[in-house]
Image (cartoon, rainbow, N blue to C red):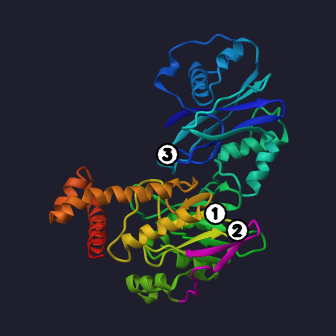
């Protein structure tokens, strides 16, 4: 588990909050408190000041270093000259067990006697501001702020009382026998459901959408076992559902979804291509007795924060795939267009690299505030989409000389993916096939 520290900097009735750069690998585009990972060298010296004696030296040294690097703020000097009134361990954020990369982050509240002039590290921070905690909470409630649960809980606690020294609850609370429900954006409830998906992912994000009084739509529930299905049923037991939406026909997006629809007595929404592909791959009996509602580009699925949430056609990874976004593009659910855990496979059946690149470019041009993938965490901005596009172009340049030389797919695999695990070789071969098809099409133009 990675250990980290965060500084809740408070002056009078204001708190200092940063927004992380969208190109960062960890929590891109998130609102956060300054801080970062504890390094090996952070335990090299002892600190004797009375304000710090109750806290581990390694935590204090890490705070000193991180605040110096990110804000050019000398916290140690501020402590020594009496400009720091209080340092309190506010809470410890523990990443849930289902996450592949886990953090133990120690949040320290630091009360300052004066408001320093910070100089932000622009490589890591896109903006940083002092503000009332209540104002930041309003941005979250309005769907305008992406933040992890401990950050959100801290701000809401400080909005109640700026003098608070702890927060309960601080972390995500997962009731026994249930799945986690995470709201990184207010009103977007995400359940990371353990599914039979492709590595490195091991869950599919099921998204529950809908304002109070509007259609409650569950997107892509796909529990990978009977046990997980029971957990999902228990998790949803106190929630009203009006419909299930299937983004595309790959089984890690609809396994046991039709069973759930029958149990709840609700329809399943999908594109006409997805219905055709499911019936082709799984048989018509797979959809037996299920009410199917066909939706397409522009269909209003529900409402979020009073805005219509509409379907968008995003072919390329799968020719019937649908995404979702509100009219103001505060966020965009892109299904399997990208993921935060690695690259997306463009399969031989139903996939097309040229069309996939067009879908990526469409999202870049639309420029939504947040990208929500089916696998992995949300990302602020469209940097993850731009990176996926650039990755495909770089892969094409790798493959081009082999294609021109008439090299076989097997030989290209050995050169382009030399260390690939055995189970992923067929998927990589499909990616190579797609690039060759694109190069062939380009050559005919």
Q: Residues within 10 Å of mark 3 (few under 14, many from 20)?
A: few
> Which label's residue is closer to the chain start, 3 or 2?
3
Which disc number belongs to residue 239?
A: 2
Q: Is residue 390 left or right of residue 292?
A: left
Residue 437, visible in the rendered structure: yes
Distance of label 3 from label 1 (alpha carbons): 30 Å
Q: Give the quarter of the figure containing the C terminus.
A: bottom left
Q: Where is mark 1, residue-wise?
A: 235
Q: Is residue 88 left or right of residue 345?
A: right
Distance of label 2 from label 1 (alpha carbons): 8 Å
Which of discs 3 and 2 lies nearer the camera? The answer is: 3
- Residue at 55% in and 69% down: 221
- Residue at 54% in and 78% down: 259
Q: Which residues are magenta?
A: 289-312
The answer to the question of whether label 3 and label 2 lie on touching residues, with beta carbons closer than 8 A, is no
Q: Is residue 54 magenta?
A: no
Distance of label 3 from label 2 (alpha carbons): 34 Å
């Amino acid at each position: 588990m990675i250990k980290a520290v965060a500084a809740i900097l408070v002056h009078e009735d204001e708190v200092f909050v940063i927004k992380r750069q969208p190109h960062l690998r960890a929590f891109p585009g998130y609102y956060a408190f300054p801080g970062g990972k504890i390094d090996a060298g952070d335990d090299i010296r002892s600190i004797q000041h009375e304000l710090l004696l109750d806290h581990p030296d390694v935590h204090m040294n890490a705070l000193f270093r991180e605040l110096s690097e990110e804000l050019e703020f000398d916290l140690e000097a501020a402590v020594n000259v009496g400009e720091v009134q209080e340092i309190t361990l506010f809470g410890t954020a523990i990443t849930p067990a289902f996450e592949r990369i886990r953090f133990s982050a120690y949040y320290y509240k630091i009360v300052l006697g004066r408001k320093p002039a910070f100089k932000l590290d622009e490589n890591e921070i896109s903006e940083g501001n002092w503000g009332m905690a209540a104002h930041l909470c309003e941005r979250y409630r309005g769907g305008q702020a992406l933040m992890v649960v401990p950050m959100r809980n801290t701000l809401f606690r400080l909005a109640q009382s700026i003098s608070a020294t702890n927060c309960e609850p601080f972390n995500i609370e997962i009731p026994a026998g249930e799945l986690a429900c995470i709201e990184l954006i207010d009103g977007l409830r995400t359940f990371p459901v353990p599914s039979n998906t492709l590595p490195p992912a091991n869950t599919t994000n099921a998204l529950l959408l809908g304002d109070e009084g509007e259609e409650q739509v569950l997107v892509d529930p796909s529990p990978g076992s009977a046990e997980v299905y029971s957990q999902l049923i228990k998790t949803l037991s106190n929630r009203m559902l009006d419909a299930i939406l299937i983004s595309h026909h790959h089984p890690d997006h609809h396994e046991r979804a039709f069973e759930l629809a029958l149990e709840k007595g609700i329809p399943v929404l999908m594109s006409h291509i997805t219905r055709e592909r499911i019936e082709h791959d799984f048989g018509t009996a797979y959809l037996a007795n299920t009410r199917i509602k066909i939706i397409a580009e522009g269909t209003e699925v529900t409402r979020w924060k009073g805005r219509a949430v509409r379907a968008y056609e995003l072919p390329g990874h799968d020719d019937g795939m649908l995404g979702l976004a509100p009219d103001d593009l505060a966020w965009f659910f892109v299904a399997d267009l990208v993921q935060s855990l690695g690259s997306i496979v463009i399969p031989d059946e139903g996939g097309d690299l040229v069309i996939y690149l067009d879908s990526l470019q469409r999202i870049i041009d639309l420029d939504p505030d947040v990208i929500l993938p089916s696998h992995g965490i949300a990302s602020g901005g469209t940097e993850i989409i731009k990176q996926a596009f650039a990755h495909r172009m770089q892969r094409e340049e790798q493959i081009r000389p082999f294609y021109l030389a008439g090299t076989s797919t097997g030989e290209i695999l050995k050169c382009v993916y030399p260390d690939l695990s055995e189970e992923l070789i067929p998927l990589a071969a499909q990616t190579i096939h797609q690039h060759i098809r694109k190069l062939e099409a380009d050559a005919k133009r």
